[in-house]
Amino acid sequence: MPMNKTRFTYPHPLIPYAVEHDVMGDSSITDEEAEIMNALYPEVVAGNPKAIKPLKELVRRCPHLPRAQNHLYTLYMMCGKRLRARRLLRELRKNHPNYLFGITNESNRLVQEKKDTAAARHLMGERLLLQDLYPERKVFHVSEVMNYYQSAVLLLLEEGDIEGAEDRHGILLEIDPEHSITESVTEYILGKKMMVNMQKMKEAQRNKRKAKTRVTAPYPQVNEAPVFHHPEMEAFYRYDLEALPKANISAIAALPKTTLVQDLKRVLEDGLRRYKYFERQSRKWEVWQEDQVSFMPHAFHFLGIYGDEDCLPVVLDVLRQEEDFLDFWFGEEAESFIFPCLLRIASGQLPQLQQFMQERYVSPHSKIMVNATVAQIAWHNMERLAEVSAWFGSIFEHYKLNIDDKALIDSDLIAWMTASAGELSLKELLPVIEPLYQEGAVSKDVVGKWAEVIELFDTPRDEADLNPLPKNISEAYDGSYYERKKFRQPSQKDKMELEKMAQDPYARKMMEILMQSGGMVPEKEPADKPLSPPVQSPSKSKTKIGRNEPCPCQSGRKYKHCCGKK
């Protein structure tokens, strides 16, 4: 054993003792016993069942060594021998009632297996502070502190006291932020926070007003392909978006505009009429055949450059289909195809778009795209701001008058309309939005509290909310027009929030997990995982966020449309 120990004191108010960081000393153990313990320790850490027999012999020979019993308990748990582990723990607690690791193991068992937090708290001390258990001690070994507060955090999380758990976690962060237990406790707390947030989001989802939807523009289904004016259109059916040769793009762009637009409309009608045909075909594919189902996005790219007002009826019919239809043809990128087209062909047809927004049974997702497009009309031409404000106001009024219409009112839709109007600083609309908000027709998980809504409308307009448009068909395909998108300059409040997040260990861990594992969040540690030394780094048990679940970032959108976007 080293003679010169490394002890530290810490300025943290909950650490009124020194913490020893060297090898834990034990005056009750002989050199021979220490040698045996040291030889078996790696086998216990590895969970090797072959170490059970020599450990049992050591426990038999040395009942005065609680550490040997604790090692055997840990190994039993790791090998799935829970009944033997419980019996040994009872014996350990009986023979060594003040042994800290026996106390923490018993607390973990009470919390994880029996959910008996009252008994665990009585065992660990009502205040869950290590110094209360051993008031006479002035020095604790780092492993004692780490394991005690790991158990305290598990107890507090089971009680639902996240704030108390964070306070105890702060002790671990102060002593050794990179310790495996500190890291594990970060994940325990983050996992609890995530579960609480998910529960709140699911509760919010249950309380939302969701419009009933159905196909409102049914098309007779056929199997036959259409006949086009121009054979060049067949390229849409042979190449996906990234593979369409530039020569074909140029050849199609050079076609007479009148017949080109007619053919583009026929492509959309083909997608409407042969949806069931292609959907059936896709079930037979072992690998998704992108080149066979890209003709609709191709058509929207070209309509965004060459379309005219006569295209609006068929485009709106596309939006009147079920959401599965849009997912099939456009995946998660529907807005990127439909927005440039709608802005080009519908800028002079706001009454038709207003009528669409007031139709019953139409997918709110489709209406959100139309809402965003009309907002962009103002962003691209501020002279039309009053016209756009009147458009929003008329629709809000219509929704207010039909607040109980279950085929019309959707709280997410109205929330995204509110956000669009707020970004344009249309403060004159607040009086008509407030009654909708008070009636629960505006999703709070999208726009926040009413004070936050007012703050949004009071915030000056930012050109970062202006979405650029492709100037030509080449930009539509290569996406280079996105480079003209302006970045939002963070406000002082934003900077403070970012700084706060940078200092938040749970926010850092959350971002690390989302970035490294594509949307995986930690789960609570399994009940049979041994948590006292020999310390095992708890496995990073995680659970996958469903693509259609609410996004954990609390944007209010589905995960697949938010942080889960590839």
Image: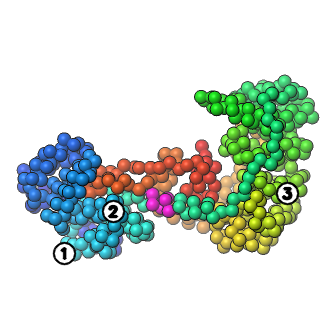
Count how many numbered circles sit on residues in the image.
3
Answer whether labels 3 and 2 touch (C-beta < 8 Å): no
Marker disc for residue 136: 1
Seen in the picture, residue 299 relative to 369 is either above or below; the reply is: above
Q: Is residue 498 above or below residue 245?
A: below
Q: Nearer the viewer, mark 3 or mark 1?
A: 3
Q: Position of residue 509 (x, y in %)?
A: 46, 55
Residue 174 falls in image quadrant: bottom left
Query: Pointer 1: residues within 10 angstroms few (<14), some, or many (20+)?
Result: few
Look at the image and name its color scheme: rainbow
Look at the image and give the residue range highlighted in magenta.
190-197
Q: Secondary structure at mark 1?
A: loop
- The residue depicted at 63 percent of the width and 29 percent of the height is 285
Q: Is residue 427 left or right of residue 86?
A: right
- Please state the horizontal and vertical placement of residue 96, each as a whole percent of the image: 15, 64
Q: Is residue 247 above or below residue 11?
A: above
Q: Nearer the viewer, mark 1 or mark 2?
A: 2
Circle 3 sits on which residue?
354
Circle 3 sits in a helix, a strand or a loop, which is it? helix
**Among numbered discs 3 and 2, the one appearing first in the sequence:** 2
Of the numbered discs in the image, which one, if any, rests on residue 114?
2
Q: Is residue 93 left or right of residue 57?
A: right
